Image: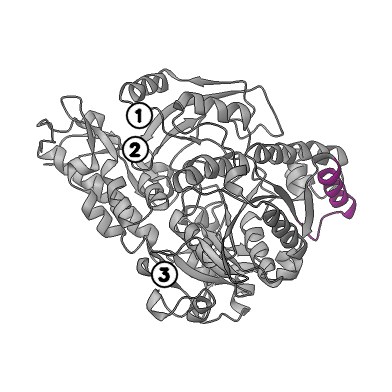
């Protein structure tokens, strides 16, 4: 069987100008990065309404959200399904534009591998997209670390802040970032060596957890970007006043580093569908959605914008609803939940090595997890379809069990999808179902119902998400988190949306707990204010904002062949 990279290389790529022409974009609208990648200029997107011409009238493009059950070692194929669905929509004559996140080097070289789909449902050129791409992540890393350097410089020289007092180094919360899994950098001591005072404890996060990443993905334009960057809280001065990136004088230079990165990247699928890939926050430690700019552009340029939210629906889709949609004024018309027979059996308690064995009881228990995600999305007012990503090793009777459960018990449309092997033809049934649901949802904004109100107290919002999405019985704040909550309330900042950072592998904060459990505790150890992004991060359980490499990282299998081509990337 051909590998993903071999399939991608065998594809005939269209010149990126040809892909752009299909969207009504000309040469003046593009900044090419070679033959098959281009950035769309800010000028080209300015003033474009989020609508598309159909039947001589202007009607709003429809937003399709693809999400999934909690991830498992067996694999689900959410990105593959996002791409396959968009290809299939185009195949049946419904113009679709994909809007995806950019891959991070952390998982590329770590456990998950790349994030460009697979088989006949890929965005290409996959090697470039998965590695340096257009340099957006490097720009975000540089902007973040510029602020860190300017903070330490201000501390070194005791530079007075607007209040007249210098920064208190003990209060600095701004770490540095690196787009790599490197657990050794989670905690470090900086300021060692002659002339480098003061010593202080700090550390590194991964770039996808940076508030700068979140800001780039939520900003409306470069003006909004600079305003949000200036609001970033980095600590306090010696008088106890909050200090921001604007106070340090870093916001303008940070924005200058990010001005090119703000432009969405245009590529294509193997089958020629246009794809905008832009921004890349993780959903387990950040808000898990691609940029607002790219999503709005996809809505403006296509009849459907097909996007995804990171990890399972309990993290990515929830944050998509309460953070991204609320910030940008968006409303999904349809949600698609991706699952596999293998993943459902794993959630039902089977060992990874035994998933090829028939076990209707384990599959039934796993279907409770699927049902939980469907119910959660429906509670947001979203029409739901289920995509069963089919594997050649699946048993037909178990596939039938899943399909009948969706139809007869959950009352939702479900389809076997073979886009990995068959390309667009393998997801046509799903595409027709999604199009029909979207057509029937005439006013997504009227139907879309977030679970907590704008301006709700963060603890109330946290409790609502924990109890209604994760089905916890209660939320427990650590003493540290209790003090942070009191401080947020005192400063009038406790009414921002909540971004729960926790393991993606379970409804609980313990990755070892499988199944559709309920009645558990969600332990929150820390609350972090992301004032520029406009949300509060709640760190639950032992989640780390700088991941580590697994025992056998994917990097071990990546190398160059005799012709200098990359091998082993998937």
Rounded to the nearest angstrom, the CA distance separating label 2 from label 1 is 8 Å
Question: Which residue has dot 2 on it?
Answer: 531
Question: Which residue has dot 3 on it?
Answer: 40
Q: For the residue carrying disc 1, how many other residues have a C-alpha within 10 Å: few (<14), some (14-19), or many (20+)?
A: some
Indicate which disc, 2 or 3, sits on the residue closer to the N terminus: 3
Question: Which residue has dot 1 on it?
Answer: 493
Comparing 274 with 311, the one in front is 274
Indicate the secondary structure of the residue bearing disc 1. loop
Residue 498: % across, % down: 47, 34
Is residue 269 visible from the viewing direction of this image?
yes
Q: Is residue 433 magenta?
A: no
**Left or right: 470, with 561 as reference point:** right
Q: Are marks 2 and 3 in contact (CB under 8 Å)?
A: no
Comparing 303 with 254, the one in front is 303
Read off the magenta span: 389-408
Q: Residue furthest right?
A: 397
């Amino acid at each position: 069987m051909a590998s993903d990279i071999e399939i991608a290389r065998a594809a005939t790529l269209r010149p990126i100008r040809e892909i752009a022409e299909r969207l009504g974009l000309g040469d003046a609208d593009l900044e090419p990065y070679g033959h098959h990648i281009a950035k769309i200029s800010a000028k080209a997107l300015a003033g474009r309404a989020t609508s598309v011409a159909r039947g001589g009238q202007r009607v709003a493009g429809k937003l399709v959200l693809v999400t999934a059950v909690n991830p498992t070692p067996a694999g689900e194929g959410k990105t593959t399904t996002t791409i396959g669905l968009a290809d299939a929509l185009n195949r049946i004559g419904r113009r679709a534009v994909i809007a995806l996140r950019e891959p991070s080097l952390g998982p590329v070289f770590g456990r998950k591998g790349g994030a460009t789909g697979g088989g006949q449902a890929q965005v290409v050129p996959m090697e470039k997209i998965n590695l340096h791409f257009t340099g957006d992540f490097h720009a975000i890393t540089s902007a973040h670390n510029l602020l860190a350097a300017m903070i330490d410089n201000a501390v070194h020289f005791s530079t007075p802040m607007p209040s007249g007092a210098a920064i208190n180094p003990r209060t600095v919360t701004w770490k540095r970032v690196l787009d790599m899994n490197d657990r050794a950098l989670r905690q470090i001591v900086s300021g060692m060596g002659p002339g480098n005072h003061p010593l202080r404890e700090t550390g590194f996060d991964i770039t996808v957890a940076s508030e700068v990443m979140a800001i780039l993905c939520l900003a409306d334009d470069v003006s909004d970007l600079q305003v949000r960057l200036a609001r970033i809280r980095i600590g306090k001065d010696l008088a106890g006043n909050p200090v921001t990136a604007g106070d340090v004088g870093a916001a303008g230079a940070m924005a200058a580093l990010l001005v090119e990165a703000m432009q969405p990247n245009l590529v294509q699928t193997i089958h020629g569908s246009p794809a905008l890939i832009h921004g890349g926050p993780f959903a387990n430690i950040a808000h898990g959605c691609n940029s607002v700019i790219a999503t709005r552009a996809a809505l403006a340029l296509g009849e459907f914008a097909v996007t995804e939210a990171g990890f399972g629906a309990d993290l990515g889709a929830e944050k998509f609803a309460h953070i991204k949609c609320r910030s940008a004024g968006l409303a999904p018309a349809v949600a698609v939940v991706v699952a596999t027979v293998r993943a459902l059996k794993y959630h039902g308690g089977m060992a990874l090595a035994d998933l090829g064995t028939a076990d209707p009881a384990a599959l039934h228990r796993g279907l409770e997890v699927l049902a939980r995600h469907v119910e959660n999305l429906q509670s947001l007012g979203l029409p739901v379809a289920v995509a069963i990503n089919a594997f050649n090793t699946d048993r037909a009777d178990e596939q039938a069990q899943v399909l009948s459960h969706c139809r007869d018990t959950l009352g939702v449309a479900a389809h076997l999808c073979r886009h990995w092997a068959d390309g667009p033809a393998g997801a046509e049934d799903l595409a027709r179902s999604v199009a029909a649901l979207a057509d029937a949802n005439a006013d997504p904004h009227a139907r879309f119902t977030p679970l907590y109100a704008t301006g709700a107290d963060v603890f109330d919002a946290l409790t609502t998400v924990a109890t209604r999405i994760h089905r916890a019985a209660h939320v427990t704040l650590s003493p540290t988190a209790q003090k942070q909550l009191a401080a947020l309330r005192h400063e009038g900042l406790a009414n921002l949306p909540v971004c729960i950072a926790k393991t993606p592998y379970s409804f609980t904060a313990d990755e070892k707990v499988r199944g559709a459990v309920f009645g558990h505790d969600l332990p929150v150890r820390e609350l972090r204010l992301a004032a520029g992004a406009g949300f509060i991060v709640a760190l639950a359980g032992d989640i780390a904002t700088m991941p580590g490499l697994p025992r056998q990282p994917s990097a071990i299998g990546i190398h160059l062949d005799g012709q200098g081509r990359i091998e082993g990337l998937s």
